[in-house]
Image (tube, rainbow, N blue to C red):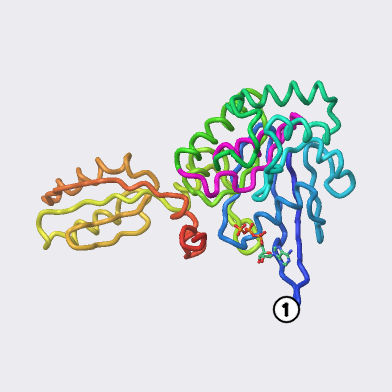
């Protein structure tokens, strides 16, 4: 559904060229929900704007929904919905009128636009608000209206650029419930950029990580975490003088990557902590070492980014 090869975009600025995107290649299959992650300035929005025909490419090629973004941008636009960071509804317009106007701008007949607007108002639980002015909506309701506006022409592909930024946790969860049900009903392909690592982790089937204009990782959240970060088993031992032996046992566990000792705690990073923990305890016991507590800490996507770049994405985003 979305394919890009060696996409680049360089901006000319007074202080010299800025290479915002440097050779991006990606493929998104029909029906996938992919999250695009990266710190501020990584090149995510520039990439999305090129894929949605809002910005010319410097070089490379891309096709979206089967159409080339350079040769046939009008056909691309018919296949996509775009909910950008600053997508706005006219503040004084009524909610339903706004949707109908959007539908007509997409060349729908008035009756088809009214029908679609009512369907979307129902699906996004905005029907009680149809006659309210857009300015009177809450942040969460406004974002749901933005999504409805992007979906008026029933596009098979939806681009969401930081859809939940600024929403409180309840409104974020509510927005996602609605996007998930829309997706289940329509089988839409969704390309999402977000700063929320937990959102990417739980919602996306695939995560693409961008840094400095290039893609540095592209896989399922589970595989990225297992391959690039790993679980950490923490075991505390009763006798401090047995710490050295415990650390040696930890380092010899299957797939052990790194072992650290802190106080009475031995921490070992490996691929699958829960599977290896019983073996770790058994080997300690065999060597006469008593463990007084044990826990497995799962990695986050921030640990993945840290492993890839040495920087925290959470801090970079902040
Ligand atoms: N119109 C422009 N003119 C000059 N430089 C630009 C322009 N748009 C973007 N850039 C630069 O390109 C780089 C990538 O910006 P982009 O907005 O794509 O990053 P991003 O990953 O989307 O960041 P954010 O998460 O903050 O939205 C940045 O260095 C930015 O300053």
In this picture, is 152 found above or below 162? above
Nearer to the camera, 75 or 222: 75
* Residue 249 within the magenta-colored segment of the rendering: no
Local crowd size for mark 1, using a 10 Å CA cut-off: few (<14), some (14–19), many (≥20): few
Q: Quadrant of ligand 1?
A: bottom right
Decide which of 34, 258 is in the foreground and name it: 34
Question: Could you tell me which secondary element the residue under label 1 belongs to?
Answer: loop
View extreme (bottom): residue = 15
Within 8 Å: ligand 1 and the Cβ of disc 1? Answer: no
The N terminus lies in which quarter of the figure? top right
Q: Decide: is 276 above or below 151.
A: below
Measured as percent of width and height from the top left, residue 97 is found at 74, 31
Q: Is residue 150 magenta?
A: yes
Residue situated in front as seen by the camera: 267 or 247: 267
Residue 136 occupies quadrant: top right
Question: In the rendering, at what x and y percent does residue 261 appear?
Answer: 24, 62
Q: Is residue 164 left or right of residue 6?
A: left
Count numbered badges in the picture.
1
Residue located farthest toward the right when viewing the structure as drawn: 71
Give whichever of 4, 120 is nearer the camera: 120
Please name the residue shown 86% across and 50% down the image. Answer: 70
Give x and y (percent) for residue 311: 48, 64
Residue at the spot 18% in from the left edge and 53% down from the top edge: 236
**Circle 1 sits on which residue?**
15
Measuring from the top left, give residue 196's x and y in whole percent: 50, 49
- 63 left or right of 208? right
Q: Is residue 22 left or right of residue 259?
A: right
Q: Which residues are magenta?
A: 140-168
């Amino acid at each position: 559904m979305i394919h890009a090869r060696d996409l680049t975009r360089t901006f000319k600025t007074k202080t010299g060229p800025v290479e915002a995107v440097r050779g991006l290649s990606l493929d998104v299959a029909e029906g996938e929900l992919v999250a695009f992650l990266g710190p501020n300035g990584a090149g995510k929005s520039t990439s999305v704007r090129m894929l949605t025909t809002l910005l010319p490419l410097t070089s490379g090629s891309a096709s979206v929904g089967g159409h080339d973004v350079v040769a046939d941008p009008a056909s691309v636009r018919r296949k996509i919905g775009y909910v950008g960071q600053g997508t706005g509804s006219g503040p004084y317009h009524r909610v339903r009128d706004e949707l109908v106007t959007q539908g007509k701008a997409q060349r729908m007949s008035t009756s088809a636009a009214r029908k679609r607007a009512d369907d979307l108002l129902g699906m996004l639980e905005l029907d009680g608000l149809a006659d309210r002015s857009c300015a009177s909506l809450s942040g969460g309701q406004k974002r749901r209206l933005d999504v409805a506006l992007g979906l008026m022409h029933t596009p098979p592909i939806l681009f969401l650029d930081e859809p939940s930024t600024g929403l409180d946790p309840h409104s974020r969860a509510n927005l996602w419930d609605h996007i998930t049900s829309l997706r289940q009903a329509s089988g839409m392909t969704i390309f999402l950029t977000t700063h929320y690592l937990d959102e990417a982790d739980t919602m996306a089937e695939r995560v693409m990580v961008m840094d400095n204009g290039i893609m540095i990782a592209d896989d399922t959240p589970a595989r990225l975490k297992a391959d690039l970060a790993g679980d950490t088993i923490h075991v505390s031992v009763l006798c401090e003088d047995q710490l050295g032996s415990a650390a040696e046992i930890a380092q010899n566990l299957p797939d052990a990557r790194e072992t650290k000792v802190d106080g009475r705690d031995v921490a070992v990073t490996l691929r699958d902590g829960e599977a290896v923990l019983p073996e770790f305890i058994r080997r300690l016991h065999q060597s006469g070492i008593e463990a007084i507590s044990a826990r497995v800490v799962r990695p986050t996507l921030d640990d993945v980014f840290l492993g890839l770049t040495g920087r925290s994405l959470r801090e970079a985003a902040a």
